[in-house]
Image (cartoon, grey):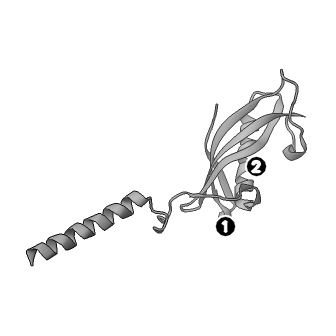
Amino acid sequence: MAGGWMLVSLLAVALVFTGAVRGGEDRPRLVGAPLDIANADNDEGLQRALQFAMTEYNRASNDMYSSRVVRVISAKRQIVSGIKYIMEVEIGRTTCPKPATDLQSCALHDAPQMTKRTTCNFVVYTVPWLNQIKLLDSSCQ
């Protein structure tokens, strides 16, 4: 009888170990954990957060030209007491002098001495139902 319990115990340990090694595709996500945003171009909340981050970036920049997003490298959404957007984006210098109102219509510089591409990480916190938005973190390389 003791051998039977030992076999059941070993089987249980093996099943737990197998689940941990598999990675957890089938496991439920943690509540409040950051989740990837699959289609960044069509996510309205992300686009508002990104527009706000770029406005703040351009306001703080000493460059005489405005910059805009070239591509979204990665984007995550985390539900906290509001919504936190965590973004990694590539930005580029445009031909529009500051302050530009519609950055998407500004062409990127293509002259080698004027081209400037940078990768930035932004964290934007928003509480849509209170109409609040804040740039928590901004770092570029």
Q: Amino acid at mark 1?
A: Trp
The residue carrying pointer 2 sits among few (fewer than 14), some (14 to 19) or many (20 or more) residues within 10 Å by Cα, namely some
Give the alpha-carbon distance from disc 2 to disc 1, as whole Å.
18 Å
The residue at the point 75 percent across, 38 percent down is: 91
Q: What is the residue that sits farthest to the top in this orientation?
A: 113
Residue on which the image places disc 2: 51
Callout 2: SS: helix
Callout 1: SS: helix
The residue at the point 85 percent across, 43 percent down is: 103
Seen in the picture, residue 63 relative to 121 is either above or below; the reply is above
Q: Nearer the viewer, residue 27 or 139?
A: 27
Residue on which the image places disc 1: 129
Locate residue 15: give its quadrant.
Answer: bottom left
Name the image quarter holding the C terminus.
Answer: top right
The residue at the point 9 percent across, 74 percent down is: 2
Whether residue 119 sits left or right of residue 102 in the image: it is left
Whether residue 62 sits left or right of residue 76 in the image: it is right
The residue at the point 21 percent across, 73 percent down is: 8
Seen in the picture, residue 37 relative to 27 is either above or below; the reply is above
Q: What is the residue that sits farthest to the bottom in this orientation?
A: 1
Q: Position of residue 132 (x, y in %)?
A: 67, 57
Name the image quarter holding the N terminus.
Answer: bottom left
Numbered circles on residues, count: 2
Whether residue 85 sits left or right of residue 101 in the image: it is left
Q: Position of residue 127 (x, y in %)?
A: 63, 61
Q: Nearer the viewer, residue 135 or 44?
A: 44
Seen in the picture, residue 8 relative to 85 is either above or below; the reply is below
Badge 2 or badge 1: first in the primary sequence: 2
Q: Position of residue 38 (x, y in %)?
A: 66, 59
The residue carrying pointer 1 sits among few (fewer than 14), some (14 to 19) or many (20 or more) residues within 10 Å by Cα, namely few
Q: Amino acid at mark 2?
A: Gln
Q: Position of residue 13 (x, y in %)?
A: 26, 65
